[in-house]
Image (cartoon, helix red, strand yellow):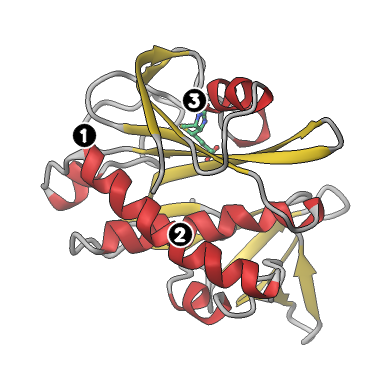
Amino acid sequence: MNNVFYKPVVDSTNLWAKEEGMNGAPCGSVYMADMQTAGRGRRGRTWESPSGENLYFSLLLRPSFAPDKASMLTLVMAMAVAEAVRSYGAEAYIKWPNDIVLGGKKLCGILTEMHIQNGSYFVVVGVGVNLRKRDFSSEIAGMATSLEEEQNIAINREELLERILKAFEKFYQEFTLRGDLCLLQDAYNDILINRGNCVKVLDPKGEFTGIARGINAVGELLVEKEDGEIVTVYAGEVSVRGLYGYT
Ligand code: BTN
């Protein structure tokens, strides 16, 4: 069972969870807000977080496995969110590594951060799900969507949170059993929207295109180049785009 803490307004639930973690908050604590004034996304981007029934939360974990495995938790959470959203009948997919996509647009983003504390570490997995119809800023309009927009259903966010946490617990147990994604990788690949598609890999060392074949047991994306070479792409370094748009 998770202890869920709520505030109407915070700067960022990830920062709130970090602060609580530094003060000794236990594994499994969840920090949720109605609105974030400084919601943070991957690669230094911001996460638009207006008030009004969207879901913004961060889960604090104190894993016993080695810290170099912690980045895979972001894929574990992506599976949990996708499963929870699918339980409402919405055909959600994962865009590698951890965006949740509905109707070809981004529904949810996940930001996982690790913090060192007195020789051990803890992890904060932050999740933002767009639930209500709204006007997104011009920067992300056309790329972002909400559950209400796509499915015409107004989901209760507490109930969605509960379903996500339940799914996460199940996937997390399977992850910790082996310390990697080997027990989860088939299920992940089944809902990977990039799979079988031509993708452009935006590698700082040089962009290339290829067919996405799925993830391996450590969450790297396998991309087959035109000459048949399979390249393993690590999420920390590069991002992947569809050739004709976001997915
Ligand atoms: C992304 O760029 O796709 C990741 C977005 C993560 C947003 C969530 S909202 C809750 C938590 N708090 C934050 O400041 N960010 C994450």
User: Which residue sits at x=77%, y=87%?
Assistant: 228
Mark 1, mark 2: which one is toward the viewer? 2
Q: Which residue is rendered at x = 29% and y = 56% of the image?
A: 85
Among the 4 quarters of the image, the one containing residue 157: top left
Q: Which is more N-terminal, label 2 or label 1?
A: 1
Find numbered disc 2 in the image and state the secondary structure of the residue it sits on: helix
Q: Residue 28: image x %, image y %? A: 50, 43
Mark positioned earlier in the residue sequence (3 or 1): 3
Q: Is mark 1 within 8 Å of ligand 1?
A: no
Q: Which residue is mark 1?
A: 132
In depth, the one of 92 and 10 nearer the eye is 10
- In the picture, measured across the screen, residue 81 lies left or right of residue 232, that is left
User: What separation in Å lies between label 3 and label 2 (alpha carbons)?
Assistant: 20 Å
x and y, in percent, of residue 118 in the image: 83, 30
Residue type for callout 1 = Arg
Label 3, ligand 1: CB separation under 8 Å: yes
The 10 Å Cα crowd at callout 3, few under 14, some 14 to 19, many 20 or more, is: many
Dot 3 corresponds to which residue?
13
Nearer to me, 194 or 220: 220
Which disc is residue 169 wearing?
2
- Contact (CB < 8 A) between labels 1 and 2? no
